[in-house]
Image (cartoon, rainbow, N blue to C red):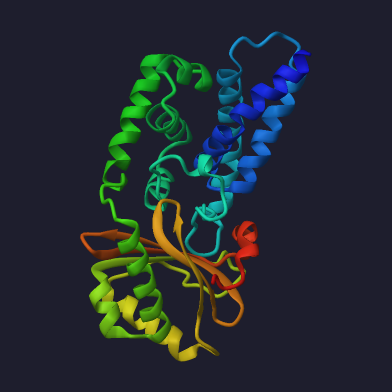
Amino acid sequence: MEQDQRIADFERERRRLERLGYRMLGSISDAQDVVQDAWLRFATAKASIDTPAAYLTRVVTRLCLDRLKSARARRETYIGPWLPEPLIDAVEPAEMIADDITTTLMLAMERLSPLERAAFLLHDIFGVALGDVAGALGREPAAVRQLASRARKHVQDSRPRYVIEAAEAERLARAFFAAARDGDTAALSELLARDVEIHADGGGKVLAARNVIRGVERALRLFTGVRRKAVRPATLLRTATIDGLPGYISIERGDVLQTTALDIRNGRIRAIYIVRNPDKLTHIEELKSPAA
């Protein structure tokens, strides 16, 4: 009977824990692995657990902190820009996307220490009480308050501030796709901010820019070159919300699945986040056919 209760307690928390794991690690599969490990510890714990949510949060946080050490070492040798696995609204349950964290903010959090990242996510995003955050991190509440404060200052410029209506988001995503597909420099010039950045994650598995492209002139040259070398035009599969940003899923340069997320500010595209690494797109393979 006690095991049945533990199963029920765990299932009630599963989605929240997966969200936490994903926001800590930037990987859906790693988050799921961490949550599964947490379940095994929870299921086999000998002692009675009075607050399952707090216990599971503590275990997942500590497992994520352990994984972040090796993840950071791997990213130092990663080929080209690193981006988190794209979280797609058309694929993941609503509970996995129930916060205001965007790709832009996740990249800003990469600059935080693991403890700062955990403190910020637990306290500011997941609303965990300061004392419980301190328990999860094994630190005094005053130290945790400082960690969260430092993290908040580092990422404040990357917090979402611009609310875009769904219809406008779709219009801009479709307009950008068409302009990029056609190499239409006039249309692209109207859409892109002067200081636009392009981050393309191919992970060394498929062709992608090895460095972040900065500035509208370089961006225009990139899209013109891609269009000139394309064997056949890109195919739009569907528009989507990708880690809180407007974007789309497409087939590019032959048969390469790609997600493109757009950070839009003041009506212009400020940053473009392209994921082409097939290892990061296995969870959306089923979308590899055009929407009606």
Q: Residue at x 34, y 83 (%)?
A: 221
**Most foreground residue, 24 or 154:** 24
Where residue 204 sits: x, y (%)?
Answer: 59, 68
Q: Which residue is drawn at 54% across and 42% down?
A: 22
Q: Can residue 85 be seen in this view?
A: yes
Q: Residue at x 56, y 49 (%)?
A: 92
In which quadrant is the C terminus drawn? bottom right
* Relative to 135, residue 208 above or below: below
Q: Is residue 200 visible?
A: no
Where residue 150 sits: x, y (%)?
Answer: 32, 32
Identity of the residue furthest to the front in this view: 292
**Most foreground residue, 80 or 119:** 119
Where residue 180 sits: x, y (%)?
Answer: 39, 79
Where residue 191 sits: x, y (%)?
Answer: 27, 72
Left or right of residue 184, residue 260 in this image: right
Q: How many labels does the image show?
A: 0
In which quadrant is the N terminus drawn? top right
**Most foreground residue, 167 or 231:** 167
* Relative to 13, residue 274 above or below: below
Quadrant of the rendered structure where residue 224 is?
bottom left
* Relative to 288, residue 9 above or below: above
* Relative to 151, residue 77 above or below: below
**Most foreground residue, 22 or 76:** 22
